[in-house]
Image (cartoon, helix red, strand yellow):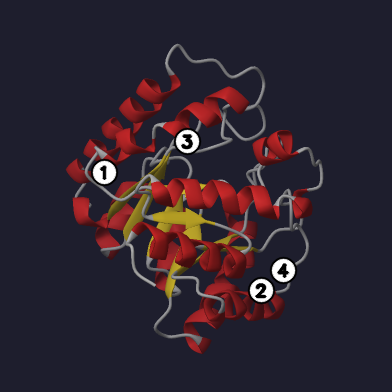
Amino acid sequence: MGIVNVTPDSFSDGGMFDDAEVAVKHGLRLLEEGADVLDIGGESTRPGSDPVDPEEEAMRVLPVLEGLRREAPEALLSVDTRKAAVARDALAAGADVVNDIGAGADPEMFDVIASAGAGMVLMHMRGEPKTMQADPRYDDVVREVRGFLAERLEAAIAAGIGRDRLCVDPGIGFGKDLEHNLALLRSMGSFRELGVPVLVGVSRKRFIGELSGTDDPAGRLEGSVAAAVWCASQGVEMVRVHDVGPTVRALLVMDAIARERP
């Protein structure tokens, strides 16, 4: 999944693609590099970020979705939003999937997705982006995150979204510290037991910088690729990344080794 952030304040590429034409070209480039899905987001959810009004968020993402659908009609497009109103407009503009960090916290979200016959990613987040990194605590982070995702899966299914259209994301870096993130990454197999595909986003995140010794998100490429390869080796079906080309090439090599074929 290639990331297309249409925001002025995302943690690693804020302001780079907030012009719709530039964002569309970026998305097309990610498809050429091997992205299977493009995830278009109009609200930064970095730690400490403030929420964006639905109208503003929609104004950011809709022209990009429409442009990508026009230029790449066969592409699989996802909208990264936790707001049902934005999801509704985005699905009408050509999105196929809603990537919801709120896991259906908006009471209208499940109905919007069910009515559209769209796919959905359910992510775990402790708290809100503004405060989620203020001393996050768990008794057993793997058990608690898995339990939350299992509950949200059942709620989505009860609302009319087919299990075959659902995916879960443990939410690396969303209300978790370094040890929480590592514990989740070591336990990817337990999330696959939920019976739906697993998506993981580790690209350029703070914990990568902590482990590799760099404060600059742009300098976290190698660590991000290493984490993506680890996730794939544990059976994760999709990784959400900024650097599609390097990640795809690394995954091709890993896959060839794992399958014992050139």
Q: Residue at x 38, y 22 (%)?
A: 144
> Which disc is residue 17 wearing?
4
Q: Nearer the viewer, mark 3 or mark 4?
A: 3
Q: Quadrant of residue 225?
A: bottom right
Q: Nearer the viewer, mark 2 or mark 1?
A: 2
Q: Is residue 254 visible?
A: yes
Quarter of the rendering occupied by the C terminus:
bottom left
Gap between marks 2 and 3 measured at Cα: 30 Å
Q: Position of residue 175 (x, y in %)?
A: 57, 28
- Residue located farthest toward the top when viewing the structure as drawn: 139
Gap between marks 3 and 1 measured at Cα: 25 Å
Q: Earlier in the sequence, mark 3 or mark 4?
A: 4
Q: Earlier in the sequence, mark 4 or mark 1?
A: 4
Q: Position of residue 200 (x, y in %)?
A: 47, 47
Three-letter residue code for mark 2 = Ala
- What secondary structure is marked by label 3? helix
Residue behind mark 2:
23
Q: Residue at x 45, y 74 (%)?
A: 93
Residue behind mark 3:
185
Q: Is residue 72 above or below residue 180?
A: below
Residue behind mark 1:
156
Q: Residue at x 36, y 47 (%)?
A: 198
- Local crowd size for mark 4, using a 10 Å CA cut-off: few (<14), some (14–19), many (≥20): many
Gap between marks 2 and 1 measured at Cα: 31 Å
Q: Earlier in the sequence, mark 2 or mark 3?
A: 2
Q: Earlier in the sequence, mark 2 or mark 1?
A: 2
Gap between marks 4 and 2 measured at Cα: 5 Å
Mark 4 touching mark 2, by CB under 8 A?
Answer: yes
Q: Earlier in the sequence, mark 4 or mark 2?
A: 4
Q: Nearer the viewer, mark 2 or mark 3?
A: 3
